[in-house]
Amino acid sequence: MTTLNRLNQYRVMWVLVFFDLPTETKKERKQYALFRKNLLKDGFSMFQFSIYTRCCPSRENADVHIKRVKSFLPPNGYVGILCITDKQFGSMELFLSTKPIKASTEPQQLELF
């Protein structure tokens, strides 16, 4: 592993958004759908039904997306936002039932500057 790759593991950040939103009324379901749609529009991918992730090339970029998520928070429900390094995200163990599965690789991103 090159030094640059090792440094990138600590520079590249993952933003995870966890949420548990009420969906009992039509209005709450609409707010749930809008929140989920805004996450997808901002580049987040569904990790599980109520967990969305986004890879960011730097902490500063992660802060921009965290601020953006805060701007469209729904009025009701619980939302958690967690920011971790690529190294920490890569050390996550995933299982399908009792069988370990391989985590998806980091999405390719093009950095111009």
Image (cartoon, rainbow, N blue to C red):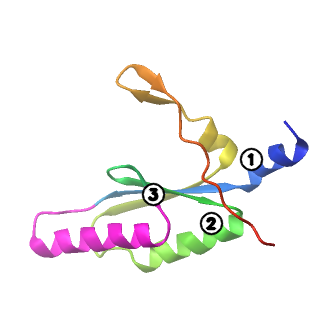
Q: Tell me where the magenta segment starts and ends, as one range.
A: 21-45
The amino acid beneath tag 1 is Gln
Q: Kindly report the distance in space between the C-alpha atoms of the residues bearing marks 3 and 2.
A: 15 Å
Mark 3 closeness class: few <14, some 14–19, many ≥20 residues within 10 Å: some
Q: Quadrant of the N terminus?
A: top right
Mark 2 closeness class: few <14, some 14–19, many ≥20 residues within 10 Å: many
Q: Which residue is mark 2?
A: 62
Q: Which residue is at a point 24% across and 74% down the rendered structure image?
A: 31
Which type of secondary structure does the marked residue at label 3 adopt? strand
* Magenta span includes 37: yes
Q: Which residue is at a point 67% across and 50% down the rendered structure image?
A: 85
Q: Which residue is at a point 62% across and 66% down the rendered structure image?
A: 62
The amino acid beneath tag 3 is Ser
In this view, the residue farthest toward the bottom is 71
The amino acid beneath tag 2 is Ala
Q: Which residue is mark 1?
A: 9
Relative to 49, residue 23 above or below: below
- Residue 35: x and y, percent? 33, 71
Mark 1 closeness class: few <14, some 14–19, many ≥20 residues within 10 Å: some
Relative to 30, residue 11 above or below: above
Query: Does residue 65 appear to the left or right of 36 in the view shown?
Result: right
